[in-house]
């Protein structure tokens, strides 16, 4: 019963927090929290929108961590340490402090190295024997591999953020999968923690989809990316029966969007891979929908619906075959190939 009351409390807290923050922003014209950069490559909103979604999610998670510590004597230090740092990195951007992308990336890398080592947060099994041997015998490679996973997912979350509900709904689908997996395998404390995150995210989506009253901001995008990474790794460690490639399938869109973009910019566009552009899959789909209906608002949330519905359908087979390593390995490869095909198709339709 106490768990139910806590879930209700966290929902009402989120709604109250966002409404109160919006009231003060409008009353006192707090421009520091407003995303009014309408001309940046990743901006697809027509009017300034408060980028305060990360604040609500972050403070709601702090309350959740405190609840677990006080009432269940469980301290989720991994979540607290990783999330606090990445929230602050994104917060600097949200309050419009000029942050060089290269310096930001270096800060992320250094921070991840320190956090992974301090939390002893390593992946023991990758599903590939060659990588398993490298991880087993070379501590440096293990550290490098985990940090690289974090970087791809965190930056992938920030990269796809910008459309109403795209990152929020995508994260929700992944968290639901991780919740049910932990619940089915009896990892109940982490399952309930993930359930709290699910309702925190739903509360945010009330204000973000289909019409955006608030954005996640960089703080929220980085925050969600790191929470997804920590949750996937903790689940993988707690339930070794599940194929590591199942988590690759769950995170394939966030990962491959960054991976493909990195090499596309270097070899095809001949430019810096850390500079933003308008040639990502979700942006091409937006251009396609805009050509078809001419409505910016509809085209915005159509992107979220189409990508997340397609993603949900694509990962369904893996949900039922999550303990079959061979299936998950080859299915994850097929998803990467499907992305490449879809990107090529979208690129042609968007012209």
Image: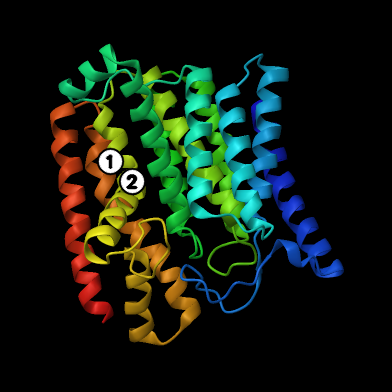
Q: Nearer the viewer, mark 1 or mark 2?
A: 2
Which residue bears the numbered disc 2?
A: 255
- Relative vertical location of residue 332 with respect to residue 95 in this rendering, above or below: above
- Relative vertical location of residue 118 with respect to residue 252 in this rendering, above or below: above
Q: Residue at x 27, y 20 (%)?
A: 125
Q: Separation of disc 1 and disc 2 at Cα?
A: 10 Å
Q: Around disc 1, counting alpha carbons within 10 Å, would you say few (fewer than 14), some (14 to 19), or many (20 or more)?
A: many
Q: Position of residue 135 (x, y in %)?
A: 28, 18
Q: Around disc 2, counting alpha carbons within 10 Å, would you say few (fewer than 14), some (14 to 19), or many (20 or more)?
A: many
Q: Position of residue 218 (x, y in %)?
A: 57, 54
Q: Is residue 217 left or right of residue 242?
A: right
Q: Residue at x 46, y 38 (%)?
A: 228
* Mark sitting on residue 249: 1
Q: Quadrant of the N terminus?
A: top right
Number of marks in the rendered image: 2
Q: Is residue 209 left or right of residue 213?
A: left
Q: Position of residue 150 (x, y in %)?
A: 42, 36
Upstream in the sequence, badge 1 or badge 2?
A: 1
Circle 2 sits in a helix, a strand or a loop, which is it? Answer: helix
Residue 189 lies in what quarter of the image?
top right
The answer to whether any part of residue 179 appears in the image is: no
Q: Quadrant of the C terminus?
A: bottom left
């Amino acid at each position: 019963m106490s768990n139910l009351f806590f879930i209700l409390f966290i929902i009402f807290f989120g709604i109250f927090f966002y409404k109160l923050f919006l009231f003060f922003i409008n009353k006192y014209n707090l421009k520091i929290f407003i995303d009014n950069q309408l001309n940046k490559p990743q901006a697809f909103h027509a009017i300034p929108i408060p980028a305060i979604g990360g604040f609500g999610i972050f403070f709601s998670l702090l309350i959740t961590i405190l609840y677990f510590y006080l009432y269940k004597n469980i301290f989720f230090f991994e979540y607290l340490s990783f999330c606090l740092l990445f929230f602050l990195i994104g917060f600097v951007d949200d309050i419009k402090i000029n942050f060089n992308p290269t310096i930001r990336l270096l800060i992320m890398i250094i921070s991840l190295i320190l956090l992974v080592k301090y939390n002893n947060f390593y992946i023991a099994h990758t599903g590939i024997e060659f990588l398993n041997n490298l991880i087993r015998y070379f501590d440096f490679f293990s550290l490098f591999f985990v940090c690289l996973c974090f970087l791809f997912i965190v930056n992938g979350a920030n990269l796809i953020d910008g459309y109403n509900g795209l990152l929020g709904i995508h994260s929700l689908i992944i968290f639901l999968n991780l919740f049910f997996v932990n619940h089915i395998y009896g990892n109940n404390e982490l399952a309930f923690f993930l359930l709290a995150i699910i309702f925190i995210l739903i509360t945010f989506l009330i204000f973000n989809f289909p019409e955006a009253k608030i954005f996640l901001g960089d703080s929220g995008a980085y925050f969600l990316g790191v929470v997804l990474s920590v949750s996937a790794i903790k689940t993988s460690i707690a339930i070794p029966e599940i194929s590591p490639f199942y988590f690759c399938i769950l995170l394939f869109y966030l990962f491959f969007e960054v991976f493909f973009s990195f090499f596309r910019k270097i070899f095809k566009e001949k430019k810096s891979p850390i500079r933003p552009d308008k040639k990502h899959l979700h942006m091409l789909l937006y251009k396609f929908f805009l050509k078809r209906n001419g409505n910016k608002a509809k085209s915005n949330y159509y992107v979220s619906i189409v990508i997340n519905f397609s993603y949900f359908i694509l990962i369904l087979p893996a949900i039922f075959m999550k303990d079959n390593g061979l299936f998950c390995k080859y299915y994850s490869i097929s998803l990467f190939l499907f992305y490449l095909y879809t990107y090529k198709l979208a690129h042609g339709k968007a012209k």
